Amino acid sequence: MRYQLEGHKAMVETHCLSYDGKVCVTSSNDRTIKFWNVKTETCLRTVDIDSFPSQIWMSPYGWYIALRTWENTVMLYESLTNIFFYEKLFGGNHSGIGFQTLAIFDLLRDGF
């Protein structure tokens, strides 16, 4: 099945689907994250960010979003409260940040 989600003002860098496939989260070079209803193809929420995103992950139930930026920053967003509650700049190799982000999700699962 193919969907067309319109609303970003720049190229979409990455996306992820919720565990149940009902919500898609996209991140774009327009420095926004958008939450989409997959069935209706409508935007549910737009969140402004200060950096250019490179990757995005969603926790299994969609409560948390982890965002990795091109500036080597990892940010964690809580969708229920609509706030970023964690941000950390990592030095060194950009390609290694994915593993650090996944480790942060392990912390969340265990009760951060």
Image (cartoon, rainbow, N blue to C red):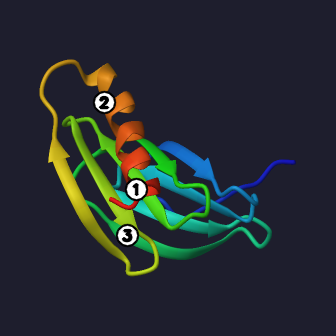
Residue 47, label in figure: 3
Residue 69, label in figure: none
Of badges 1 and 2, the one in the foreground is 1
41 left or right, relative to 32: right
Q: Residue at x 39, y 51 (%)?
A: 66
Q: Residues within 10 Å of mark 1 (few under 14, many from 20)?
A: few
Q: Residue at x 54, y 67 (%)?
A: 35
Q: Is residue 27 visible?
A: yes
Three-letter amino acid code at the position of disc 3: Val
Q: Position of residue 95 (x, y in %)?
A: 33, 21
Three-letter amino acid code at the position of disc 1: Leu
Mark before the other along the chain sequence, 1 or 2? 2
Of badges 2 and 3, the one in the foreground is 2
Q: Give the image quarter of residue 112.
A: bottom left
Q: Residues within 10 Å of mark 3 (few under 14, many from 20)?
A: some
- The residue carrying mark 2 is 97
Separation of marks 1 and 2 at Cα, in angstroms: 17 Å
Q: Look at the numbered disc 2 and give the secondary structure of its residue.
A: helix
80 left or right, relative to 62: left
Separation of marks 2 and 3 at Cα, in angstroms: 22 Å
- The residue carrying mark 1 is 108
